[in-house]
Structures are given as structure tokens and as C-alpha cells.
Amino acid sequence: MTPAARLSAAIGILDRILTGAPAEQALTNWARASRFAGSGDRAAVRDLVFDALRCRRSFARLGGAGTGRGLILGGLRASGQEIAALFTGEAHAPAPPEGPELAPQAASELEALDCPDWLAPDLQASLGADFAPVMEALRHRAPVFLRVNLARGDRPAVAAGLAAEGIATRPHPLADTALEVTGNARRIQTSAAYRDGLVELQDAASQAVVEALPLEEGARVLDFCAGGGGKSLAMAGRARLRLWAHDADPRRMRDLPARAARAGVDVRLLAPGEPARHGPFDLVLADVPCSGSGSWRRAPEGKWSLTPERLQALLGIQSGILDETAGLVRPGGHLAYATCSLLGRENGLQTDAFLARSAGWRRVRQLRLTPLDGGDGFFLDLLERIG
Ligand SMILES: C[S@@+](CC[C@H](N)C(=O)[O-])C[C@H]1O[C@@H](n2cnc3c(N)ncnc32)[C@H](O)[C@@H]1O
């Protein structure tokens, strides 16, 4: 595909996303219907689409419209590319700009930062002086991180093995298991290191959260909101645990047994209603559903689809999970509350409210990470049951 044809493809896919199609699904449907597109084309179109979703507000301003065309035009203008050479209307190229597309308007501060207006006060209160740098960081692609499975090898040896397969990495300071991929990231999932369970794809901040947990050999641990099980596997890689995984939607855990087998660790799955029968636990991790604002680099659609009503509903779910999981922790044990959110209301204010309404708990550690630390935004409050 020519560079201009890739732009046309991205425009069509963005238009589908803007009318409600999930981004991954729209990209997959396009790839299936476009057998002529090679892997380089697919990767380039994907980058165009995700770059536009991350910067949807500012690109729409620069492109003169909030359409697929407007976003792609705005992205080209933002990176100083020559529009006339690409939007020619010839062959598969997009038609030349017209009307408002020719007269982009100046962006306001929040538009330039790609921040939804309604969320700005919350984010400013939560991030303080880091507000603008964090919002700016969220406009750019996230690095690719691997987690070294310490049950299978140490970080230098695994990095050397990856290098022998042509995948360049460097250790990342956020966690002792973290490798940042600096070259050939697209080869990871076909590498022997990945196939043999030496590494998993996992953000460095997620790894830092797991590193901060009290994981004693033989401890009874419950991952209450396990999802795909990324943190279950990360915990199992750090100590020999008696580990259970649970999720309100058990279908989300369907790949976990195979991933655990690949990693050489043991995780038992629990259906809704079952955790209480297996408790109490030494440690319960509640990696709760949240706005996802800390991971908007990877999942930028969430920035634009979040609403005040949805955030309110999430706050209710989070406080319900805190109350439910508190009853599963043994006296002297720990409840680890985690989010990938940057919002104080989902983080420290949520745990403050829990501590205010629940006797016999104290906060022993708090971790607040933003993309300025290198990985996603993440929050951890480690609470100890003293009564
Ligand atoms: C942030 S995701 C978990 C990600 C996962 N821990 C990981 O590291 O990959 C939150 C999960 O909580 C689950 N969930 C939502 N409401 C829940 C509830 N009331 N009880 C337990 N799990 C819930 C969702 O299905 C979702 O899989």
C-alpha cells in the first residue's frame, strides 16, 4: 500500500470507530477484508488509528473536523507533513481538503492536551503540577514492557536470550522483573522466550504494584478481580504461593490455566460466590475495575467514552468490592487495593472512605505511579487488618 492508501484505510476505520465500533474489532474487520495489506501495512494503519484516538481532540481541531478525515489531516499537520502530496485524490489517496478542513482553528489548552473538559478539574486536583506533563504523556505511544518470570530465569539471562532472538531490551527501574523492549517488539509473541514462559507482556507499573505486595512463601493469596490473570501470574512468579483467582465475569479468566501452565505455576480458579469458602486469606488483591485513566496511552478510546455516570457507577463498584474483600482477609493479613486510574476519587479518596467506615484496618503502604514514571498510571493502597 502507498502511504496515501494507508491514510485512506485509517480514515475508513476511524469513521467506524467514531460511530461506535470498538477499535480492535474495526481494525480486525478491515484487515480481514483487505488481503492485499501486508504486515507492514497493517502495523502502519494501526499506528495511524491509535495515534488519532490518543489525540482525538487536538487532531480534530487541527484537521477542521471530528471525522476520520479530520483526525488524519490533523495528525499530519501536527507532525508537519506535506498534506498536498498525500491528499491528492488520485488512485487510493484521500481527496484534497476542502471547506473547514482548509482552515484549522487554534486549540484551547485542554484541547491541545487532549483532555475531556468534564474530567479536567478531577485530574488537576489529583495530579497537581503533574497535570499538564501527564496529559501530554498520554498523547504518545506507551513503551512495550516484558515481565521476566523469575520462576523460570533471572532478568540478565532472559534479556540475553531475547537478544539472541533479535529482540533488544533494557532493564527498567520500576520493577526488578521489568524489561523495556527497545527493538523488534513485533517478534515477541513468536519468540521462544515467550513460548516457553520466560516472559509475559506486562506494563512495568503493574509489575511494580506486584513487587510492592507482601508475598511470603506458602501464603494463601486471592486475586479477587483476576481478569486475564496478569497479576496472578506475576504474583506466582515471585514466591511459591497457594493462589486462587476469581472474577465476577469468569469468562475473562479463560486463558489463565494455559498461561499458568506455560509459566510453570499453579493457580486455582474460583467461580462467583466461592471465595468465602476458601478464605480467610493472608493477602487479597482487589485490582478493581476503574476509569482506566492511567492506561489511556494503550486504550485511548476509554478517554472519550468515560462519562460522569459511568465514573459514578465505577466508584460504587469499587467501594462494594472493598467491603466484600475486607471480609476475606485473616486478622493480621493484607488487603491490596489497586487501580490503573489517575483519579483521586478512585484511589486514595476511595480507600480513605473505606478506612473511615471500617474498624480494624490501617494503611501500611501507598504507591502512586503516573506515566511520568515510565509505565502506566497505577495506584496501590496496602491495608492491614489489625482487628
Ligand atoms: C482491572 S480489571 C483486572 C485486571 C487483572 N487483574 C490483570 O492484572 O490483568 C478488573 C476486573 O474486575 C472484574 N470485576 C468487575 N466487578 C467485579 C466484582 N464485583 N467482583 C469481582 N470482579 C469484578 C472485571 O470483570 C475485570 O476483569
Image (cartoon, grey):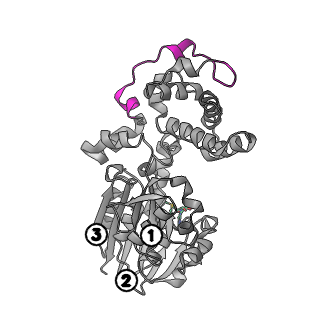
The reply to whether discs 1 and 2 touch (Cβ–Cβ < 8 Å) is no
| Dot 3 beta carbon under 8 Å from ligand 1 | no
Residue at position x 37%, y 65% from top?
Answer: 209
Q: Position of residue 364 (x, y in %)?
A: 27, 71
Q: Nearer the viewer, residue 99 or 325?
A: 99
The local crowd at label 3, few if under 14, some if 14 to 19, many if 20 or more residues have their Cα within 10 Å, is some
The reply to whether discs 3 and 1 touch (Cβ–Cβ < 8 Å) is no
The reply to whether discs 3 and 2 touch (Cβ–Cβ < 8 Å) is no
| Image quadrant in which the C terminus is located | bottom left
Which secondary structure, mark 3?
strand
- Point out the frontmost of discs 3 and 2: 2
In three-dimensional space, the C-alpha distance between marks 3 and 1, rounded to whole angstroms, equals 36 Å
N-terminal-most mark, 1 or 2:
1
What is the three-letter code of the residue carrying label 1? Answer: Val
Position of residue 261 relative to residue 20, above or below, is below
Which secondary structure, mark 1?
helix
Position of residue 260 relative to residue 185, above or below, is below
Please check the rendered image and state whether residue 102 is part of the magenta-colored stretch, yes or no: yes
Is residue 7 among the parts visible in the rendering? yes
| The residue positioned farthest toward the front in the image shown | 164
Q: Position of residue 44 (x, y in %)?
A: 57, 39
Q: Which mark is residue 158?
A: 1
N-terminal-most mark, 3 or 1:
1
Q: Which mark is residue 363?
A: 3
Please give the residue where the numbered disc 2 appears in the rendered image. 216
The stretch in magenta equals 89-113
Q: Position of residue 205 (x, y in %)?
A: 38, 59
